[in-house]
Image (cartoon, rainbow, N blue to C red):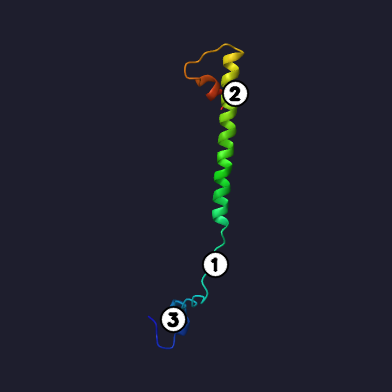
Amino acid sequence: MIEKGDTEEVDALVVPEPEPASQFPVRRSPAPVAQAAAAAAGGIVIGAAAGFVCFEATQLLKRKLHVDDSLDVSPVHGVG
């Protein structure tokens, strides 16, 4: 039980007041938007390069090895 003179235990139970919020609004940098745009552009470049390589592999198998796969599954999935 807490007596009237026991201040040590009472001080431990007191929750400090939060500091007041800043008067100025927080300015956020446009970096997340730029990073998202760079990630999307990189994905488009990688996809285009992979598509080109898979297409050329398909054409190589058709011309050089005379393999006619009905859906071109072997060269596309094998190379891609």
Q: Could you say whether the residue bearing mark 1 is in a helix, strand or loop?
A: loop
Mark 3, secondary structure of its residue: helix
Which label sits in the foreground, 3 or 1? 1
Q: Which residue is mark 2?
A: 56
Q: Return the residue at label 1.
A: 27
User: In the image, is residue 64 above or below residue 20?
Assistant: above
C-beta proximity under 8 Å, tags 2 and 3? no
At x 55%, y 49%, the residue is: 37
Report which quarter residue 33 is drawn in.
Answer: bottom right
Determine the residue positioned at 52% across, 74% down: 24
Q: Residue furthest left?
A: 1
Q: Secondary structure at mark 2?
A: helix
Q: Look at label 3 and name its amino acid.
A: Val
Q: Read off the residue under disc 3.
A: 10
Task: Give the amino acid at mark 2.
Answer: Glu
Query: Quarter holding the N terminus?
Result: bottom left
Real-space Cα separation, disc 1 to disc 2, in angstroms: 49 Å
Query: Disc 1 vs disc 2: which is toward the camera?
Result: 2
* Residue type indicated by callout 1: Arg
- Cα separation, mark 3 vs mark 1, equals 40 Å
Task: Give the mark nearest the N terminus, 3 or 1.
Answer: 3
> Where does the image place residue 10, in percent across and percent down from the top left?
44, 81
Mark 3 Cα-neighbour bin, 10 Å: few <14, some 14–19, many ≥20: few
Percent x, y for residue 61? 58, 16
Task: Give the spatial CA distance, label 2 vs label 3.
Answer: 78 Å
Around disc 1, counting alpha carbons within 10 Å, would you say few (fewer than 14), some (14 to 19), or many (20 or more)?
A: few
Q: Any mark on residue 71, and which?
A: none
